[in-house]
Every structure is written in C-alpha cells, then in structure tokens.
Image: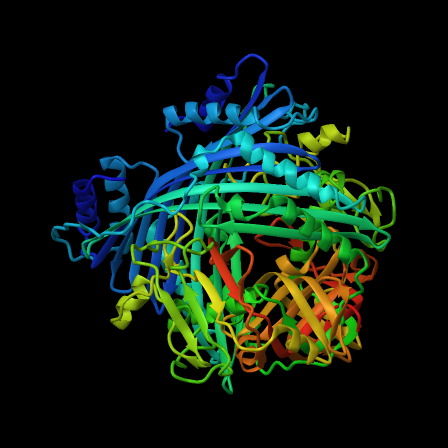
Amino acid sequence: MPELIDIATRVVGWAEAGEQVEAYVVHERETEIRAYEGEVESLTSAESQGVGVRVVVDGRQGYAYAGTLDETVLRETIQEARDNAAFAEADEFNGVAAADGVAPAALDLYDHDLAAFPTDAKVALAIELERATRAADPRISGIESAEYVDSIGEAAVANSEGVVASAAETGCYLSAYSLAEADGETQTGFGFSIGRGAAELDSAAAADDAAERATRLLGAVKPPTQRLTVVLDPWVTAQMLGIIGHTLTGEAVQRGRSLFADRMGEQVGVAELTLLDDATNPDAFTATIVDGEGLATRPTPLIDGGVLQGFLHNSYTGRRGATGSTGSAVRGGFKSGPGVGAHALALTPGTRTQAELIAGIDDGLLVQGVAGLHSGVNPVSGDFSTGAEGLRIRGGELAEPVREITIASTIQRLLLDIQAIGSDLEWLPMSAAGVSIVVADVTMSGA
Amino acid sequence: MLDHELINRTLGAALRTGGEFAEVFVEDKRSSSATLDDGRVEELTSGRDRGAGIRVVVGDTTGFAHTADLSETGLRNAADAAAAAARGGGGGVREVAVTPVDTPRTNGARIAPEDVAKATKVELLSLADAAARGEGNAITQVSARYGDSRRRILVANSDGLLAEDDQVRTLFSVSCVATGDTGLQTGRESTGRTIGFELFDEADVEDMARRAAGRAITKLAARPAPSGAMPVVVGPGGGGVLFHEACGHGLEADLVAKAASVFAGRVGEEVATPLVTLVDDGTMAGEWGHFTIDDEGRPAHHNVLIQDGVLTDYMWDHLRARKEGRPSSGNGRRQSYQHLPMVRMTNTYIENGSDDPADIVSSTDNGIYVAQLGGGQVNTATGDFVFGMTEAYLIENGEITEPIREGNLIGNGPEVLTRIDALGDDFAMGSPGTCGKDGQGVPVGDGTPTLRVTSLTIGGTAA
C-alpha cells in the first residue's frame, strides 16, 4: 500500500483557497488470541485503516471520517468535512497546528521482530498463559479469559500549514483473568505482561499475578464503615492519575470544568507531589514522538513540589490560552478530531517500597482494585467514590481481605492528604504510570 | 447489500479448511453528530464505516477476520484468513446456498436523519444552550450533543440463513455545570431512541436542558452523601441500570459457561423475592436497545429471565446455544463488523409491581432516594456491583428532604435480588446507555418502577 504520509499530504493538497485542511491517516494490524481449556477459543486477525479530515474555513470547523483509504472515498470525505464546517459557528481559535520548531524525540517504538512473529508462537503464548495461571495455585478454579494481543500501527498527520509527521509503534500484551474458589466462595484476579515486542512478555509473571490477586481475596469480609489511612496499589494510583490528568487539560480549564482552574502557582498538593506528563519517556507504553496534530511531544511539568505549574494544551487550547501547544493533542482513532489529554503521566517516586509503607501504618487498608471509577469520580467537582477491594492493614502488616466497600474523598483533599509516595514506579497499559501512595483520612464505607 | 452468489462463494471459501460453521456479517454504517460547547456549535462530524467480518468455527475454536474491501477478492482474502485462523484441517468443498429470511427490511424511522438539514440539527443545540442558561447565572457551562446513525446489516451463514436489518438511532444529550460557593456541580439529561428525527416530536430539548440545569443547581446545595449500609429507594426508570449490573451480566450464557457467574447452574431456583420479574426484550420498538434481528441474524426475542423470583433462563448467542442444543435467544450482538459477536443485553427491565410509589417513600424511615443513576460495573463472578448516583436525596422520617452529593452505591447482585421489599406500579424506561463488555460497546435500554432495596452500601464521605 502507498505510504500513509503520501495519502495525508495528497488530501491536504486538495485544500481550496482560504481553507485549512488536516488529514490523519492510520493503518493497523492486530492479532488477538484467546485460549480456553488448552485450546484456541478465538483467533482474530485484523487489518484496518481509516482517515479523518478536518477543514477550517473562516474559523468554522468541520470533520469527517471513513474506514477506508479508497481514493473516491478520500475525495468524498474532505467534501463532507467542508460541508460540515459551513454549519458550525466561528471561533477565532480554531485551526490546525502550526509547526513550532520542536524536533520529535529520537525514539524507536517499533519492534521489527513483532511483525515477523509467527501466529503459532502467539497461540503458544496464550495457551501457556492459561496453563500457568491454572497451575499457579490449587485454589484457581477457572479462567474467565487468557489472551495474547498485539498491534502494529502507523499514523501520519499532515496539514496545510506545513506540518507533516508520521510515527510507527508496536505493542503486545498477555492478560489473564482468573477465578479462585474456597469454601464455596469465588474471587477474581487479573495479571498481565506488556511490551513493544513478544520477547519482553513474561507469561509466568502474569499468571502468578492473576492467581495471587484472586486467592488473596478469598475469605473477604465486609467491614464496618470508618475513616482510615489507605495505600493505593500502583494499578489504582494510575487510574486516579488518568482522571486527574483530564482535569489538568486546557480544555477542562478554559471551559470551566476543572477544579484546578484559576489555581496556577498555588499549592494544590503536598510538597512530595511532582507530576509530569512525558510521552518521550520510552519506558511508557503510550510513548509517542508526535501528538495527534503532528507536533512533537515533549515533557510537560504539571505539578512541582505540590505547586500547580501548567496545563496540557493542543493547538486550540494553546492559542486560546496564549501559551502554545504542549504537544498534548490526543485522538481516539480517526473517527474524531484531536482533543487534549495526557500521554504518559508519572509521579516522581519516593524511596520506600510498598511493604515499607505498609509497615508504618497501624490501622489501614491496601486498595488492590477499584470498580466503577468511571461513574464514581466527578472530574468537575472533584468528588469521588468508588467500589474497592483489598486487604486491611493492622499493626504494620497485611491482614484480612475486605470486599463490597467503597472509598470516598475529593481529588482536592486526596492530593493534600498524601503521606508518602512509594519507590515502586511501574508503567502500565494506560496513559499513566502506577506507584503506591499512602493517603490519610479516607472514608471506607462498608456495613 | 451483497449479491447472493458472492455470499455463497465466500462462505464456501471460509469452509475450505473443514470449518463446521461459517458466517459473513456485512455492515454499512453512516453516522453524524454535532456538538455545542462553551456557547457555540463547535463541530459537525460525519462518517462512514463499511466492511465485512467473517468467522469460521471448528470445534471450540473460532477464527475471525474482517475487511473493508467488499470486492470478491477482499471477501475471499478475509474468508481465507478466518479459515486459517480456525484451522480445522478437514478440507474438502462444501456448497452453501443461503435463503433470505423474510425480515421487515424497512427501518422504523418516520423521518430519516439523512433527510434532515444540518441546520435543523444544529438549531436543537442552540435551543438547549439557551434554555439551560436561562435557568440562572449559576449555570456557567453547557454542552449539548446531537447524534444519529443508520446501520444496515446483512448476516449470512452456512446454515443457509440470510437476514438483513436497517437500524436508525437518534440521540440527544445536555450537560450543565453550575458554579457556587461550594465549587462546581454537574447535571445531565439524555434521550435516545431507535427511531429517526421524529424523536424530537416527543422529546423537547429545551425541557431536557432545563432539567439538566436544575440538577446541577440543586446539587450546589447538596451535602456530602452519608456512608454505610441503609435502605435505598430508586425512582422509576432510574433503577434499570441496577438490574443490568446486578444480575443482567451474570445471566449471559458465555459467562455462565465458564462458571464466571454467580448464577451458573441455578435455573429453576428462587434467586429473587417473588416480587421480581426480570425481562430482556429486544423487540421493544423504538427503545434504545431494539433491533429486528441481532448481529447473528436471529430475530429479537422477549426473554423472561426471572419469573416471580425464579431463575428461568439465561441469554444466548449462536455459539453457546449450539453447544447446548437449543435456539439462540437473539442476544448475539457486536459493536461493528470488526468485532466478534457475543452475548449482550438489549432492553432489560423489571416488570411493574403493585405498590403506590408514594407509600414506598413514606414507609421508609431513613435512607436514600435515588432519582437518577450514572453508570455502573459488575464483577459477574462475585456478583459485586457498583453504580453512581447522579441525583439523590436523603429520606428522613418518610420524606424526601435534602439533596446529597454524588457517590457510588455498592452491593451484591444475588443479595440485592432478595432484599427488594417494595415494587411500585409506575414503570418507566431509563436513559439510553452504552454497555461495555470486553472492550465492545453496544446500545442498551433499561427500565424499572420505583423500588426499595432494604440495604445497600452508600459510598459517601460523611462517616
């Protein structure tokens, strides 16, 4: 097939006088293999491509997409975007990104071996993951899913202001959801392993995690309601950071939907709190050298020593806020235009391990997993309340598992109530790294 | 959408490696949406997705491939890939001849969205914005979204089935932010139906905007939600998502087959109070989870899952039903031609009871009244579920009093089913939803009358 960058450039070349045009073209190959009871349950082999076209005329913006790169369809798509633009209202800050001279980081995010990795070997990994998870503990009673997934993707962006960029990335992971049973009670747990190439995958580690997370919840009780100190597992912290990242976007701030609006330069968290978004960190699985508008990604400090330092911007919010883009345009595929968001958020880690943090807590809770975060956190007001499961901490040691509880506070208080940040920074399959954090005075609702 | 002979040849190719079952799913979907935010109509988006997904089943293994290329070559390549993925090894040629099933191929839309001028759609957004802002200066931000889609599908398989459907859906939502001394609060309203633009004959977008604004303003004065276990009364329509999470997912046959459901092996048992009759019904014309055929070509069904408290059946797709030697219940759905079908809900609801809703509140000494729920999530293996309250009040001495701030409720599905002690006679459908499962989203509806759960855990901050 032709180079994506050539297709994107060709579409941009169709811009008429007075028009700005941006074309975003993607191509992706994916394999997904699910194993069950030693066999392949399903094997999906997929190749997909698509284009998204943005047209801006006199400050009016329109968008159209199509799931094919067929020449006729490309022509229809730009025409449709042009037609859509006529019905939107003008906004002086609308427009495609202007080149800003920042050079993309020199990162190699493409594993050539993955493209040549044979399907049989992928199948073997999925089946081995399932076997190892079942074998990890005699209390493992079943497997909800055990899968190998990979993706080899390329994206190109071009616009009529001279931005032309492309990036190719690979990724793969193994994940297992296990069921554990004892005394008629069932619990579930998950484990995963992720890499740019298959050589980085570790099925034994994923299987052990899936088994341990499920078995250690066996015998869980519903505790009484109280306020206590919680330790958030790295997985949980990363999910919270994902939501906090959303509140730190120029879009949320400019549209009056962020609890951090008007707080630049203020102390919003404890002095130990330093938060950076950095898509150029190759350890992040969401690392990328160009953003959704074709600008180079770059490190963006958000909170430093607890003080609010900056917000994330794409070219629209960067123009509107007169700060310029921070290379933080994100796209949810070719079906929508560029929004603004974090690529790879991380807290600066501390010096103590999770075990050391727990040893310092007399009466607390280790939160191993949360449920319903999407419905339980209001990123506008900052209120959050989420279902949780985990282990009580008594006298500095892990004690009985608990379930059917919620933990609640506000994002504002959470950042000010952090007592310690762990040393266990870990990049996860999401746009944030995990690390253990200790938070004082959280409400645990139970019986 | 495709020539029958081409379909037959494609199915034949898919079966060449010894597949026992092959299926071609063709989809042509057009969508359009328009958003208003920050006081102006921001952007109109339109898109088209067209392609085919081909699956081949050999024993317990499914091979799947999809293509956006609907030419003979494109389909042949996808069929080969799916056959290779399933790898039966039997070989040989199997002739397939599909027979069209007589399904009504005209959609239920009276006014096709593509026939409506874009300017008319955009005007709805501006009306909603003005109406919300008219509720007072406390309303500091409004966003509104209009969306429509027309999805034509064709399903053909090696059993000879050939069926087509034409699904039109229209959606409108408004979200408001209110600002006060205590910070920011939000309120939302949405409506979505499997009909065309005539949606707006029955849904007044200005009314919706005023309700969303009112919700956000009310919450400015809300106090922190209490925490701990207490009685919860859920208003009409609002409770559907509770049953979707609490037991709907656990009644999906794929999860049951893997013993990843607390309801596995319990057909015929009393799993709920006799007040509860739970139905999943894809035939409810116009509702958000409605269709004529599912994404495996089976007609939508009215499936009674729990009758007077007794578990009567699960929901089935083709694969799971075939294994059990029974018919599918019309619950095989997929997000798009790029996805494998699996067991999914349609419109899930609790039938009316006989209690007077006012009596249900007045006979509750102290608890919570939930008028609107947000999204939820369930762990089907344990039955533990959560869902967010987006509009809720305290009940004190039998009366609805102060609004409370958002919080999650947490409970256990099987326990909740046995703890429903009152069911009203005021059935209503709730808001349109998107149900996520294994990364695939599909439109679903739900409904309930007013009901009371004797004890649920409220996850507030007021300990």
Residue pictured at 37% horizontal, 66% vertical: B302
Task: Give above or below for B304 relative to A75.
Answer: below
Tell which residue pokes out farthest to the top in this image.
Answer: A17
Percent of width and height locating residue A420: 80, 62
Residue pictured at 47% horizontal, 65% vertical: B348
Please identify the quadrant where the N terminus of chain A is shown.
Answer: top left
* Nearer to us in this view, A320 or B19: A320
Residue B288 left/right relative to A356: left
Task: Give above or below for B236 relative to A81.
Answer: below
Q: Is residue A390 visible?
A: no
Please identify the quadrant where the C terminus of chain A is shown.
Answer: bottom right
Percent of width and height locating residue B349: 48, 67
Residue pictured at 29% horizontal, 61% vertical: B61
How did the renderer colour the structure?
rainbow
Percent of width and height locating residue B268: 38, 83
Percent of width and height locating residue B96: 15, 51
Residue A407 left/right relative to A14: right
* Nearer to us in this view, B354 or B222: B354
Q: Is residue B366 visible?
A: yes
Residue B327 left/right relative to B366: left
